[in-house]
């Protein structure tokens, strides 16, 4: 009985990832369109929007690819999933750390607003992905 519950949790996770991807793509694209149409030179917003849209596209591809492989899992499969989720959460937090580094370097030493905007975009994506992955880890916990 728990295998179908786990499958349902995985589907919900991938749907949330897909929604986040769509929001990111749409948000980044809208910001870029407004900057282009109004001919506004705003490097911080431009690079934030580029990062947001690009990460959204990658996340959408990941969600679609993972959806194809959804299946009922046994205990060993559940443990493999948890291992992957913990690894992804660590990587996601690493992305957030890279974003913080870009913001600090871009602002403090370089005064490049493009780097600051890109850093904020990477930080936002890293934290959002870490939260999504950690939420699934928490939901799976009682099933084990």
Image: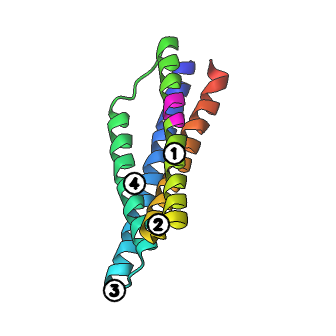
Pick the front one: 104 or 83: 104
Marks 2 and 4, the one that precedes in the sequence: 4
Residue range highlighted in magenta: 85-90
Marks 1 and 2, the one that precedes in the sequence: 2
Quadrant position of residue 115? bottom left
Residue that label 3 marks: 39
Marks 2/3: CA–CA distance: 25 Å
Q: Position of residue 105 (x, y in %)?
A: 50, 59
Vertical position of residue 121 compared to residue 92: above or below:
below
Q: Magenta segment: does it hold 89?
A: yes
Q: Magenta segment: does it hold 61?
A: no
How many residues crowd around disc 1 within 10 Å: few (fewer than 14), some, or many (20 or more)?
A: many
At 49% from the left and 70% from the top, the residue drawn is: 111
Pick the front one: 61 or 6: 61
Vertical position of residue 107 compared to residue 2: above or below:
below
Observer-side mark, 1 or 3, equals 3
């Amino acid at each position: 009985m728990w295998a179908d519950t786990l499958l349902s949790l995985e589907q919900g996770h991938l749907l949330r990832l897909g929604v986040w991807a769509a929001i990111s793509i749409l948000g980044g694209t809208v910001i870029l369109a407004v900057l282009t149409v109004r001919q506004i030179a705003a490097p911080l917003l431009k690079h934030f929007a580029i990062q947001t849209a690009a990460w959204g596209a990658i996340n959408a591809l990941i969600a679609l690819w993972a959806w194809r492989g959804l299946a009922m899992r046994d205990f060993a499969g559940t443990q493999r999933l948890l291992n992957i989720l913990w690894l992804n959460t660590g990587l996601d937090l690493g992305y957030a750390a890279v974003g913080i580094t870009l913001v600090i370097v871009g602002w403090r030493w370089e005064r490049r607003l493009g780097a600051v905007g890109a850093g904020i975009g990477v930080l936002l994506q890293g934290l959002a992905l870490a939260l999504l992955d950690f939420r699934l880890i928490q939901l799976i916990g009682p099933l084990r």
